[in-house]
Image (spheres, grey):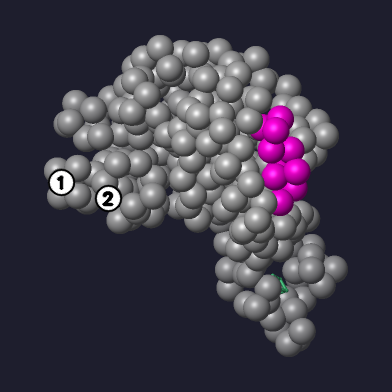
């Protein structure tokens, strides 16, 4: 259940240049309906509390008095209550005003063609929570983008759809081929995409997809999906494994994919070209 009246944020990054037009402040929101095995922000998937365990800080080997009560050494005290902060919260809950204050600090960059991007996690997960803030930003002519998979309830999309200036849509066409399963809310993706396309012109939407070798093996079927949804321009994001340490700190298993090889990528680009799909290539 959402913390009413609060916006749950895992991170705020300033001066970003790959998350929409111009220089932007990116707000990473917590909570996602999906669980992509290549996710590079795993701390943003679970809305409910989780912690990073910073192992190098832990003094369990040094016979400290305060460690003796810790459950790590079979004591009674919850390890998340570590007095020296070995467990760090993955998020902070902001009121609308508090988050507005964080955003408005970068007002100058918004006046020179930049803006604010809500990312995550899945920003539509907290659509109702961020709507008043987005309305306030819009009333001050601040450009607002959302980075979403569109795998979210249609009602959540409706909260924000008319307010958003720019959409970064992370396609998940590789997911089913890699994991041999499909997301259950695929129909909502269809509906959501139709709704966004009915409101936003094509220059206000950037389609992106993470590419790994395992996805390239299914290039033809991925292209069939791009054609099915009439997607003619796409940015390919190269898979990396830089988030491995975060998975370790969260205590969840990390699945490693292989970075796309140059030959595979150029064959994929050539297949895309043959179908009239323009692709660019970027690092995440
Ligand atoms: S109290 Fe903190 S430092 Fe000590 S064992 Fe527990 S988590 Fe580690
Ligand atoms: S949709 Fe994005 S945030 Fe959610 S699990 Fe997938 S990669 Fe991570």
Residue reaching furthest to the bottom:
62
Q: Nearer the viewer, residue 177 or 89?
A: 177
Q: Nearer the viewer, residue 268 or 47?
A: 268
Main SS category, magenta section? helix
Query: Residue 229: x percent and y percent?
Result: 56, 20
Tag 2 and tag 1, C-beta contact below 8 Å: yes
Extent of the magenta region: 213-222
Residue 239 horizontal side relative to residue 15, left or right: right
Residue 200, above or below 95: above
Q: Nearer the viewer, residue 27 or 186?
A: 186
Residue 245, above or below 199: below
Q: How many marks?
A: 2
- Magenta residue check for 149: no
| Dot 2 or dot 1, earlier in sequence | 2
Q: How would you rate the neighbour count of disc 2 (Cα within 10 Å): few for under 14, some for 14-19, many for 20 or more? A: many
On the question of residue 49 being in view, the answer is no
Query: Residue 15: x percent and y percent?
Result: 30, 56
Residue under pointer 1? 112
| Residue for point 63% across, 70% down | 54
Residue under pointer 2? 23
On the question of residue 219 being in view, the answer is yes
User: Which element is circle 1 on?
Assistant: loop
- Magenta residue check for 221: yes
Residue 275, above or below 120: above
Q: In what quadrant of the picture does the N terminus appear?
A: top right
Residue 137 horizontal side relative to residue 124, left or right: left
Residue 131, above or below 49: above
Query: Residue 230: x percent and y percent?
Result: 52, 20
Residue 242 horizontal side relative to residue 29, left or right: right
């Amino acid at each position: 259940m959402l913390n009413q009246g609060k916006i749950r944020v895992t991170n705020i990054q300033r001066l970003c240049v790959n998350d929409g037009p111009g220089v932007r402040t990116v707000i990473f929101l917590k909570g996602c309906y999906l669980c992509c095995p290549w996710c590079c922000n795993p701390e943003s998937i679970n809305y409910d509390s989780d912690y990073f365990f910073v192992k190098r800080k832990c003094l369990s080997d040094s016979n400290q008095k305060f460690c003796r009560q810790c459950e790590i050494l079979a004591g009674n005290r919850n390890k998340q209550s570590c007095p020296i902060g070995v467990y760090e919260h993955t998020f902070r809950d902001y009121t609308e005003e508090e988050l507005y204050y964080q955003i408005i600090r970068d007002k100058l960059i918004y006046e020179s063609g930049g803006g604010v991007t809500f990312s995550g996690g899945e920003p539509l997960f907290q659509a109702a929570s961020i709507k008043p803030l987005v309305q306030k930003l819009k009333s001050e002519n601040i450009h607002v983008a959302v980075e979403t998979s569109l795998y979210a309830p249609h009602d959540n999309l409706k909260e924000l759809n008319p307010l958003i200036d720019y959409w970064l849509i992370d396609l998940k066409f590789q997911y089913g081929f890699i994991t041999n399963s499909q997301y259950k809310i695929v129909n909502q993706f269809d509906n959501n995409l139709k709704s966004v396309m009915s409101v936003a012109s094509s220059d206000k939407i950037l389609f992106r997809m993470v590419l790994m070798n395992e996805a390239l093996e299914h290039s033809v079927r991925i292209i069939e999906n791009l054609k099915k949804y009439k997607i003619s321009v796409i940015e390919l994001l190269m898979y990396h494994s830089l988030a491995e340490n975060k998975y370790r700190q969260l205590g969840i298993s990390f699945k490693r994919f292989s970075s796309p090889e140059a030959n595979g990528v150029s064959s994929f680009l050539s297949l895309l070209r043959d179908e009239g799909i323009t692709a660019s290539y970027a690092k995440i």
